[in-house]
Image (cartoon, helix red, strand yellow):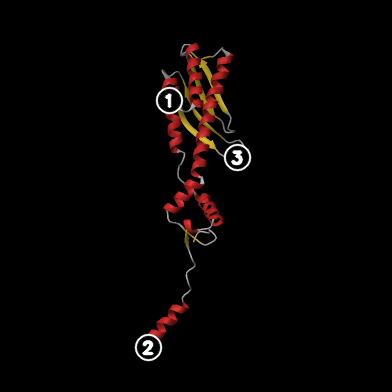
């Protein structure tokens, strides 16, 4: 009898565990707080890797050999840049359309580059280099001897189009980031990892 009483007394002295909730059990305001917690530590992996891989693949189709890509998102001066080289690539416009049939922006970029090469006998080349201040240096040459391109319109259009491709890469990165941070994906990740929370949405 004394042992039974002692057992009951011991249970009464234990500090009760705070109530914890699964994400689906939270109120809407608590869910939003839980999402904020997740987003603060999310994307520690290289989420941009497949965007880089696709950019390099598309660049190769258009004659752009990308050596290095860097980017900045959601701050003043954000953008994407790459170092590399450019030269003629056969069937570039058709290859890009097959690869990304619904991407009109990419089709235009490929068509402009292909048109420039057609006018200049497939002899245009460029070297692309990102500077420390995030400016991009592009040198356009013509012919195997590396002579400067004397067609000022072609020179400017090629530079502008290569920069346009950089903006396209930046747009792909922005879209992927927004997708990864969307409520739909965040909710899926929280529920899939079975995180638990307090009633207010703080991590338990």
Query: Compared to 14, does 193 lie above or below?
Result: above
Residue 61: name its quadrant.
Answer: top left
Q: Earlier in the sequence, mark 3 or mark 1?
A: 1
Q: Earlier in the sequence, mark 1 or mark 2?
A: 2
Query: Compared to 111, does 121 lie above or below?
Result: above
Q: Quadrant of the N terminus?
A: bottom left
Which residue is disc 2 drawn over?
1
Q: How many marks?
A: 3
* One can see residue 59 in this view: yes
Which residue is disc 3 drawn over?
75
Q: What is the x, y in percent for residue 5?
A: 41, 85
Query: Compared to 66, does 145 lie above or below?
Result: above
Closer-to-camera residue (199/156): 199
Q: What is the x, y in percent for residue 73?
A: 56, 39
| Image point (58%, 30%), residue name | 135
The nearer-to-camera label among 1 and 2 is 2
The secondary element bearing badge 2 is classed as: loop
The numbered dot on residue 19 is none
The secondary element bearing badge 3 is classed as: loop
| Image point (38%, 84%), residue name | 4
**Distance from Cα at disc 1 to Cα at disc 2:** 83 Å
Taking the view exactly as shown, the residue that stands out farthest to the right is 76
* One can see residue 43 in this view: no
């Amino acid at each position: 009898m004394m042992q039974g009483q002692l057992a009951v007394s011991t249970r009464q002295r234990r500090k009760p565990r705070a109530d914890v909730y699964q994400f689906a059990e939270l109120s809407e305001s608590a869910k939003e707080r839980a999402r904020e917690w997740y987003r603060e530590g999310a994307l520690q992996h290289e989420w941009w890797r497949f965007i880089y891989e696709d950019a390099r693949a598309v660049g190769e189709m258009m004659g752009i050999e990308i050596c290095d890509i860097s980017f900045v998102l959601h701050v003043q001066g954000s953008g994407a840049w790459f170092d590399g080289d450019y030269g003629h690539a056969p069937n570039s416009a058709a290859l890009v359309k097959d690869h990304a049939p619904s991407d009109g922006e990419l089709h235009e970029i490929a068509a402009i580059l292909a048109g420039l090469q057609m006018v200049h006998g497939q002899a245009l080349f460029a070297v692309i280099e990102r500077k420390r201040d995030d400016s991009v240096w592009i040198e356009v040459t013509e012919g195997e001897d590396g002579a400067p391109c004397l067609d000022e319109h072609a020179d400017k259009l090629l530079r502008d189009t290569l920069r346009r491709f950089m903006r396209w890469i930046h747009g792909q990165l922005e879209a992927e980031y927004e997708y990864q941070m969307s409520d739909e994906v965040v909710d899926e990740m929280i529920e899939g990892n079975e995180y638990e929370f307090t009633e207010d949405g703080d991590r338990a």
